[in-house]
Image: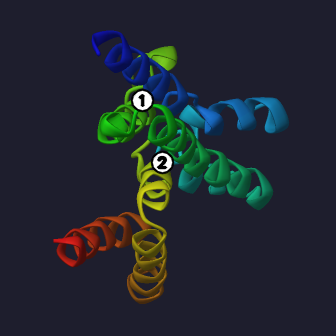
């Protein structure tokens, strides 16, 4: 059991820690996203570069790195699925590759939610879009949508 925990811990963290925003902006724009806008590696800051395609790809890949470890863990070690989600999220927020300075984790969190419950994932997206349309603040939309999701699931 200990080796299973270590394997899930390590692989989920590594999956979550891939800094797609940094990689894509370096690769396609020859820029370091950590020197732009909020200096964050996430999709919202990548959007500040003006390149919607790179921002969309970052968002998709950040969501995917939350989904993949959960689905693998669900299949092989279903009793460790929550550890997998936690480690993928912590990997995104604190990636070892860039001195533990990552993104805020919203897209990876969304991937984790989708992997655990399609309904909750869709509910998060709908509430995020509605709150964002009203407030025009991505971070506030993320916080409130997470809170709403908590209340609904509780």
Rendered residue at 66%/53% (across/down): 60
Looking at the image, residue 132 lies above or below residue 108: below
Q: Nearer the viewer, residue 64 or 47?
A: 64
Tell me what residue is drawn at x 44 percent, y 16 percent. Answer: 96
User: Residue at (44%, 68%) from the top-left corner?
Assistant: 138
Q: Quadrant of residue 5?
A: top left
Q: Which residue is mark 2?
A: 108
Mark 2 near mark 1, Cβ–Cβ under 8 Å? yes
Q: Is 126 above or below relative to 4?
A: below
Q: Secondary structure at mark 1?
A: helix
* Separation of marks 2 and 1 at Cα, in angstroms: 9 Å
How many numbered discs, if any? 2
Q: Quadrant of residue 140?
A: bottom left
Q: Residue furthest top?
A: 3
Residue 86 visible? The answer is no
Residue 91, label in figure: 1
Label 2 neighbour load within 10 Å: few <14, some 14-19, many 20+: many
Q: Quadrant of the C terminus?
A: bottom left
Where's residue 104, x and y in %? 39, 46
Seen in the image, is 13 located left or right of residue 79? right
């Amino acid at each position: 059991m200990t080796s299973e925990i270590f394997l899930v811990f390590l692989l989920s963290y590594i999956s979550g820690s891939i800094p797609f925003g940094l990689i894509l902006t370096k690769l396609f724009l020859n820029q370091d996203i950590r020197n732009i806008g909020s200096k964050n590696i996430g999709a919202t800051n990548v959007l500040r570069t003006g390149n919607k395609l790179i921002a969309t790809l970052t968002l998709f890949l950040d969501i995917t790195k939350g989904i993949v470890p959960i689905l693998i863990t669900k299949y092989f070690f279903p009793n460790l699925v929550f550890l997998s989600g936690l480690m993928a999220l912590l990997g995104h927020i604190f990636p070892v590759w860039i001195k533990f300075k990552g993104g805020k984790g919203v897209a990876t969190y969304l991937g984790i939610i989708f992997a655990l419950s399609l309904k909750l994932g869709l509910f998060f997206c709908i509430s995020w879009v509605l709150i964002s349309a009203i407030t025009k603040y991505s971070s506030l939309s993320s916080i409130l949508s997470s809170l709403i999701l908590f209340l609904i699931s509780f």
